Image (spheres, rainbow, N blue to C red):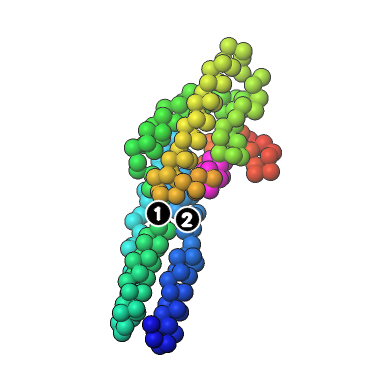
Amino acid sequence: MTMMQRMIGWPLMALVLASCVTINIYFPEAAAEEAARTIVRDVLGKEGESNGQAPEQDKPQSSVQNTQLLLIAARVLDALVPSAHAAAPVNIDISSPAIKRLRASMSRRQSQLDPFYRAGAVGFANNGNVTIRDASAVGLRDRGKMKKLVADENRDRAALYREIARANGHPEWEADVRNTFARVWREEARGGYWVQSPQGSWNRK
């Protein structure tokens, strides 16, 4: 390898490595909130909003053409950069069969949970779950049913958050998905429902 090739090659290889490291696979908060609001409104019986299609991002083109070393580096960059951009979506996909099944299950359960929400026995917790906050608000004979409904709901919610992250190719987003849903559940809760603030206090909407 000539001195000129070394002078040109090392900066290009550094650029390739930097491209791999510095392109962030970010969590798309706005898209996640839109998806969460659609699902929460659907579960609570409100009309959901559809997600718009994002325009395709332009793929970067390399202008490096001279030596064989430059051509190889250009091809590597052209392969790496578009895939990294594609991995940072501006939409959140909530159309997988598993997500649809979980939405349907939660929607069917809503009518059974609604009396417990309104009685103040069950509320929307600040961790994205539902929780029994005052069992004494309902009669003894209904408490077993309430506990089962809460357990089933939390099972579905946990599976939903996990599946949304997985379906979008980023299982590491599960905690972010859960946090987004926790906030949206509070905001979309019906009048009379109890919600828990991020600080832990309970308030009735």
**Disc 1 to disc 2, how far (Cα)?**
8 Å
In the displayed image of the protein, which residue is found farthest to the bottom? Answer: 4
Classify 10 Å Cα crowding around label 2: few (below 14), some (14-19), many (20 and above). Answer: some
Amino acid marked by disc 1: Asn
Regarding mark 1 in the picture, which secondary structure is present there?
loop
- Return the mark for residue 28: 2
Amino acid marked by disc 2: Pro
* Magenta-colored stretch includes residue 151: no
Whether residue 144 is visible to the viewer of this picture, yes or no, is yes
Viewer-side residue, 79 vs 14: 14
* Image position, residue 195 (x, y; %): 61, 37
Whether residue 193 is visible to the viewer of this picture, yes or no, is no
In the displayed image of the protein, which residue is found farthest to the top? Answer: 141
* Image position, residue 83 (x, y; %): 36, 61
Pointer 1 or 2: first along the chain: 2
For the point 41% across and 35% down, which residue is it? 103
For the point 50% across and 35% down, which residue is it? 158
Viewer-side residue, 188 vs 63: 63
Which span is picked out in magenta? 176-187
In the displayed image of the protein, which residue is found farthest to the front? Answer: 1
Q: Is residue 53 above or below residue 97?
A: below
Q: Is residue 128 above or below residue 145?
A: below
Viewer-side residue, 57 vs 112: 57
For the point 46% across and 35% down, which residue is it? 159
* Tag count: 2
Q: Give the residue number, with chain letter if any, for mark 1.
A: 91
Q: Can you tell which quarter of the image residue 75 is in?
A: bottom left
* Image position, residue 147 (x, y; %): 56, 21
Is 18 positioned to the left or the right of 74 in the image? right
Is 118 positioned to the left or the right of 8 in the image? right
Q: Main secondary structure of the magenta part?
A: helix
Could you tell me which quadrant the C terminus lies in? Answer: top right
